[in-house]
Amino acid sequence: LYYAAQVPIGVSPISNSVLFLKYAQNPFPTLFKRGLCVALTTDDPLMFHTTPTPLLEEYATARHAFALSSVDMCEIARNSVLQSGFEPRFKRHFLGEKYSSLVPGGHADSVGCAAPASSRAVAAASGARR
């Protein structure tokens, strides 16, 4: 149902690893590969991050730890903008004029993600394994 509805999910792997789960066991890459609308987030950056740019730290760490491609990173950033509470004009600026086609129901003020068109998500939805 999370895939079908493209329910937005924010994951903070660094904070998760400090609190309860080893980084390599984080569900983020599995959720992402299955085509769910996941984004990287920060959770209490003053406690869990070691750089002055905690969100960049999350992206850099995830890219290397989970072997994410540049395209994967762009999709994750896109999901983040779609999940955000930004006004439609900001989302349009970052995602293009037709960004509302990326959200459920096509409503410009919706929060969420439409199913990604990547081959990874299509394969996941059809049950194929890579």
Image (tube, rainbow, N blue to C red):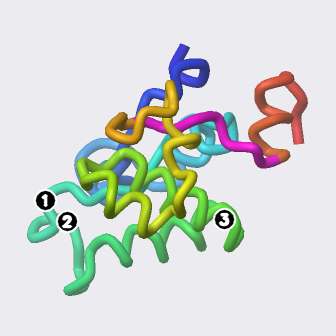
Q: Which mark is residue 126?
A: none
Magenta range: 112-118
Give the vertical position of 129 relative to 20 (above or below).
Answer: above
Q: Which mark is residue 68?
A: 3
Q: Which mark is residue 44?
A: 1
- In the rendered view, does 126 fall on the left or right side of 114? right
Q: Helix, strand, or loop for circle 3?
A: loop
Count of labels in the image = 3
Identify the residue under disc 2: 48
Q: Position of residue 88 (x, y in %)?
A: 33, 52
Instruction: Verify CB contact (< 8 Å) between mark 2 and mark 3.
Output: no
Q: Position of residue 36 (x, y in %)?
A: 57, 35
Residue that extends furthest to the top in the rendered view of this protein:
1
Q: Position of residue 33 (x, y in %)?
A: 68, 43
Give the vertical position of 77 relative to 118 (above or below).
Answer: below
Q: As shown in the figure, which amino acid type bears the numbered disc 1?
A: Asp
Label 1 crowd bin: few (<14), some (14–19), many (20+), radius 10 Å: few
Q: As shown in the figure, which amino acid type bears the numbered disc 2?
A: Phe
Which of the two marks, 1 or 2, is nearer to us in this view? 1
Residue drawn at x 57%, y 37% as measured from the top left: 31
Q: Report, in whole angstroms, how far the alpha carbon at label 3 lies from the one at label 1.
A: 24 Å
